[in-house]
């Protein structure tokens, strides 16, 4: 469904130019759940922003369902974006709108359906996330877990082929995380959605993923099934998935450490 070839992204200029993504290559298979993990600053969010067309790479190609994303014209970009939905980390609901209007927004913007049909579709999507009957509530009346589920209902409003999840479990209690995990898996199976999940939640990634990609300093250091990641002998991977403060990934850095890291990341 998604092919990413030799993606490279830098920020800054001259001596301060930093390599944020370095030769990122990945395939996201149709109907599967792929989680991207890694520490803060590893490049996860940068990958996501490239996949949704917010960032343009310095080099490399992105093919989404057969359409080239990089350097695409406006018509192609609009067609590609109609193929996917996004569940933002904060939910990104409009506070002034009801739940019904938030979920209906993509349908009103991108279809010519009449209001009765839109309302029926909204009820269906809310039913899928277990929140039918919440149509007339405002975001301020919702819990954190409910906001995430409404955001997911909006992300699937147009029956997309792909859904991108940006830290879907952030800020939730363990039960709410379990609910979101189950929804991601169920929707992937029932709607044959290709899911790309950026997450710090290792237990969640291990539960839901068909494939896990781990980034470190802008490079893929591991890609495989949860079992393969769990059994990796790479000390960086073991430190990260076990949450150990001691290991090759430093918890704190001295001025010298920052200097050495900058040298590694600079353009040669």
Image: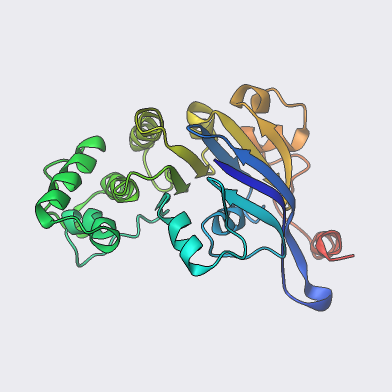
Placement of 162 over or under 103, stated as above or below: above
Q: Residue at x 35, y 55 (%)?
A: 91
Quick check: can you spot residue 243? no
Front one among 157 and 141: 157
Q: Residue at x 37, y 30 (%)?
A: 182
Q: Residue at x 42, y 50 (%)?
A: 83
Location of residue 229 by image quarter: top right
Q: Left of 151 or right of it: where is 69?
A: right
Point out the image quarter for the C terminus.
bottom right
**Residue 129 placed where, x, y %?**
26, 38
Placement of 258 over or under 187, stated as above or below: below
Location of residue 266 by image quarter: bottom right
Q: Which residue occupies the extreme right position in the image?
A: 268
Placement of 257 over or under 189, stated as above or below: below
Q: Left of 184 or right of it: where is 153?
A: left
**Residue 198 placed where, x, y %?**
53, 46
Point out the image quarter for the N terminus.
top right
**Residue 102 placed where, x, y %?**
23, 58
Front one among 225 and 29: 29
Q: How many marks?
A: 0
Q: Left of 87 or right of it: where is 33?
A: right
Display colour scheme: rainbow
Front one among 160 and 167: 160
**Residue 51 placed where, x, y %?**
56, 54
Quick check: can you spot residue 3? yes
């Amino acid at each position: 469904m998604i092919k990413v070839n030799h993606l490279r992204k830098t920020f800054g200029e001259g001596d301060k130019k930093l390599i944020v993504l370095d030769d990122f290559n990945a395939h996201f298979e149709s109907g599967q759940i792929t989680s991207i993990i890694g520490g803060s600053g590893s490049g996860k969010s940068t990958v996501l922003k490239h996949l949704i067309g917010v960032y343009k790479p310095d080099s490399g190609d992105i093919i989404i369902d057969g359409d080239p994303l990089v350097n695409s014209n406006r018509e192609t970009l609009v067609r590609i974006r109609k193929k996917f939905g996004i569940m933002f980390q904060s939910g990104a609901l409009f506070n002034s709108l009801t739940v019904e209007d938030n979920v209906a927004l993509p349908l009103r913007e991108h279809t010519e359906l009449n209001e009765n049909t839109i309302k029926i579709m909204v009820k269906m999507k809310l039913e899928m996330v277990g929140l039918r009957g919440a149509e007339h509530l405002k975001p301020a009346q919702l819990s954190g877990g409910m906001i995430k589920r409404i955001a997911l209902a909006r992300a699937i409003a147009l029956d997309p082929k792909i859904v991108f999840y940006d830290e879907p479990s952030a800020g939730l209690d363990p039960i709410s995380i379990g609910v979101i995990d189950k929804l991601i898996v169920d929707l992937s199976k029932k709607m044959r959605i290709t899911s790309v999940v950026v997450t710090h939640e290792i237990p969640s990634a291990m539960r839901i993923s068909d494939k896990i990609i781990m980034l470190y300093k802008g490079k893929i250091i591991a890609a495989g099934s949860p079992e393969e990641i769990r059994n990796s002998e790479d000390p960086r991977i073991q430190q990260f998935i076990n949450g150990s403060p001691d290991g090759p990934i430093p918890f704190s850095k001295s001025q010298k450490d920052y200097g050495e890291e900058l040298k590694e990341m600079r353009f040669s």
